[in-house]
Image (cartoon, rainbow, N blue to C red):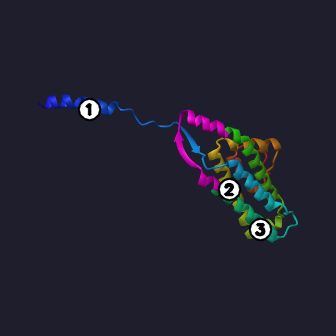
Amino acid sequence: MLFTKLLLALPFVGVAFAAPAPKVASVATVDKRDIDVLAIVTDLKTSISASVAGIELVSAEAEVEAALVAVLAALDTAHSSIGSSAVARRDGGIQALKRELEARDLIDDVANVLAEVIQLVDGLVDNIAAELQTIPLIAGLLAQLAPALSLVLAGVDLVLAGVLLLVGQILAALGINLSPILGSLNGLLGGLLGGLLG
């Protein structure tokens, strides 16, 4: 009698084990429904350009401080815009490929704008007189530049995979010598600037 019950239950056990496993995606993508990366980085470039426009080696401490605070605020705004809009999810197949191809159309434009942003920030650092860089408030603000810029770059790379490598290649091709304050960006940009750091 126990054997009969076991025999009758066997088809149900087989169905349970024969059910297909849930589909596990092999490609991680980012849902970009609400994000326009090019607009965000273009706004960032515009904000930074306006902030650093008047800074020269003869600029006063207050002017330098205001410019650094404005640049850090612009970087924070860009990071927040990218971070709050990008929602990581897993997907596979044709939809993932389609999103990747759409993203590739933007990568060149975004990489060029990011390279300009890095050049603007580096130019700001170069235009701050050495004696101002030793003032604790200015030194503290300068120390925040590389991490803030790294957050923006990493966020953009999350949305547009591979953009950082292209940014590194653009900067290397232009022979940009980053200041030591921004030297930590080298690792993020694929190590392409190793010989170019000033």
Judged from this view, the residue extending furthest toward the right is 58
* Residue marked by disc 1: 12
- Looking at the rendered structure, the secondary structure element under dot 2 is helix
Q: Is residue 10 left or right of residue 55?
A: left
Q: Which mark is residue 66?
A: 3
Query: From the viewer's perspective, is residue 19 above or below residue 31?
Result: above
* CA distance for labels 3 and 2: 18 Å
* CA distance for labels 2 and 1: 55 Å
In the picture, residue 124 is in which quadrant?
bottom right
Q: Residues within 10 Å of mark 2 (few under 14, many from 20)?
A: many
The answer to whether mark 1 and mark 3 are in CB contact below 8 A is no
Q: Residues within 10 Å of mark 1 (few under 14, many from 20)?
A: few
| Badge 3 amino acid | Ala
Q: Nearer the viewer, mark 3 or mark 2?
A: 2
In the picture, residue 9 is in which quadrant?
top left
Whether residue 95 is in magenta: the answer is yes
Who comes first in sequence, dot 2 or dot 1? Answer: 1
Who comes first in sequence, dot 3 or dot 2? Answer: 3
| Badge 2 amino acid | Ala
In this orientation, which residue lies closer to the viewer: 117 or 136? 117
In this orientation, which residue lies closer to the viewer: 165 or 184? 165
* CA distance for labels 1 and 3: 72 Å
| Residue 121 coordinates in the image, percent (x, y) | 77, 56
Number of numbered markers? 3
- What is the magenta range? 81-103
In the picture, residue 11 is in which quadrant?
top left
* Residue marked by disc 2: 78
- Looking at the rendered structure, the secondary structure element under dot 1 is helix
